[in-house]
Image (spheres, rainbow, N blue to C red):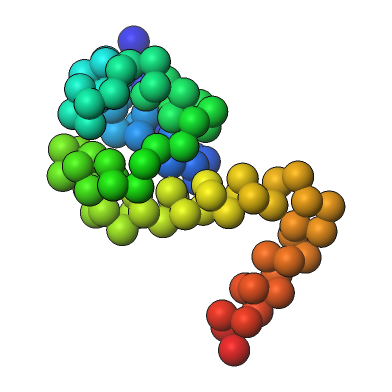
Amino acid sequence: MTKQVFHTNTLGDKLRQLRDEKNLMQREVGAVIAVDGAFISKVENSEKPINRKHLTTLSKFFKVDEDDLQTLWLADKIRLIIKEEKLGKQAIQIVFNDFNQ
């Protein structure tokens, strides 16, 4: 079986990639943070957000930098807020410019 390579910037895709690299089932990852496999599936498909507190546990479990997971988590939250906004891109550009001044 060929492993999928994900090149998107969502937390769900990153978690799926990490899980696939360890050949784990969704229920096995879910057990690490006391949720079921169906919940992990929804997180991987960006249908459900994961609680921020779980990122610490998952970063230790997968042996990855927690800041990387936190960054994707925050990007997902921002994406969720602005995705339905007609002027979302313009608003993000203003914020980006503010941070770069």
Residue 50: percent from left, percent from top: 40, 37
Camera-nearest residue between 36 and 59: 36
Count of all numbered marks drawn on residues in the image: 0
Camera-nearest residue between 6 and 51: 51
Q: Quadrant of the N terminus?
A: top left
Res. 6 in view: no
Drawn side of residue 64 relative to residue 78, left or right: left
Location of residue 92 by image quarter: bottom right
Residue 33: percent from left, percent from top: 23, 31
Q: Residue at x 41, y 56 (%)?
A: 71
Q: Is residue 43 above or below residue 82?
A: above
The single residue placed furthest to the right in the displayed view is 86
Q: Is residue 65 above or below residue 43?
A: below
Q: Quadrant of the C terminus?
A: bottom right
Drawn side of residue 93 relative to residue 62, left or right: right
The single residue placed furthest to the top in the displayed view is 1
Q: Residue at x 56, y 80 (%)?
A: 99
Residue 29: percent from left, percent from top: 24, 25
Q: Residue at x 83, y 52 (%)?
A: 86
Q: Is residue 92 above or below residue 27?
A: below
Location of residue 16 by image quarter: top left
Res. 61 in view: yes
Location of residue 78 by image quarter: bottom right
Drawn side of residue 42 relative to residue 17, left or right: right
Camera-nearest residue between 72 and 4: 72
